[in-house]
Amino acid sequence: MNDTSHRDFLPNQPVREIFNEIGAIAAFSVLVSKQIFKRPAELPEFLRQSYTLGYKALPLVLITGFILGMVLTIQMRPLLVDFGAESELPGLVTISIVREIGPVIIALICAGKIASGIGAELGSMRVTEQIDAMEVSGTNPMKFLVATRVLSTTFMVPLLVIVADFISLIGSYTAMNIHSKISLSLYLSLSFDDLTFLDVIPATIKTVVFGFIIGIVGSYKGYHAERGTESVGFAANSAVVTASLAIFVIDLLAVQITDLISIL
């Protein structure tokens, strides 16, 4: 009787695995952060990874940003027209994209494109024992392979979000000109009239955290892939799911913090 009641209060296996995973990723993040600041810096590898990761994700980011701006404008315009506030449409679309929709959507795309790629690449290197060979030869794989990728995603994801925000405005301008003609200069003026630093700065900081998490999760899943070819696919899929969930959780916390700052 006592044993049964005691077991009822113990967390079940899935819950324990989730918390173990969170703890392992947190410990991995600390190790990687230490490697980032170690000398000498792996600048050539960092630049190569930044170019590769950004170049691969850029076409999808551009298409998504343009469509996102058009869709928001088309959906919001009828409601504003009913209230006679069509002139407020550029500002509302811009604030919506810059503050919330742009960073989250682009981060999710990067999680699917970049985190899965890092997980599969490092997973295949682990399975084929390339990482073990680097350790034996005296090369620090944590610094050369992981730290450079994490640093690259931390820098590139905010840049991709900024590009997507700009392209979203172009998409919104295109959609608005379907129904009413407006010059690009006037549209941009209306777009940025209501935009403040409180909209831009928290969103930018949030994208930096998103980039770091995408790099960390993808690298962790790939670096700790188990032996066997099937583990490569599992590492890639798990990286996407974990990074996406982390983005939503971080976004929720960031919104709460921003709301508190605006009240103060």
Image (cartoon, helix red, strand yellow):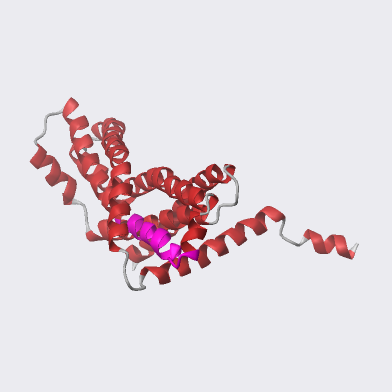
Q: Residue at x 57, y 43 (%)?
A: 229
Res. 207 in view:
no
From this view, report whether residue 178 is shown above or below residue 142: above
Residue sticking out furthest to the top: 178
The residue that appears at 32% across and 61% down in the rendered structure is 205
The foreground one among 209 and 45 is: 45
Q: Quadrant of the N terminus?
A: bottom right
The answer to which of 198 and 217 lies nearer the viewer is 217
Q: Provide residue 146's location: percent of width, then percent of height.
A: 42, 60
Q: How many marks?
A: 0
Q: Is residue 161 left or right of residue 188?
A: right
Left or right: residue 188 compared with residue 198: left
- Closer to the camera, 246 or 21? 21
Q: What residue is drawn where x is 56% and y is 60%? A: 22
Query: In the image, 9: left or right of 201?
Result: right
In the orientation shown, which residue stands out farthest toward the right? 1
Q: Position of residue 220 (x, y in %)?
A: 50, 57
- Tell me where the magenta segment starts and ends, as one range: 136-155
Residue 227 can be seen, yes or no: yes
Q: State the predominant SS element of the stretch in magenta.
A: helix
As drawn, 87 above or below 47: above
| Residue 72 drawn at (x, y percent) | 30, 36
Q: Is residue 248 above or below residue 176?
A: below
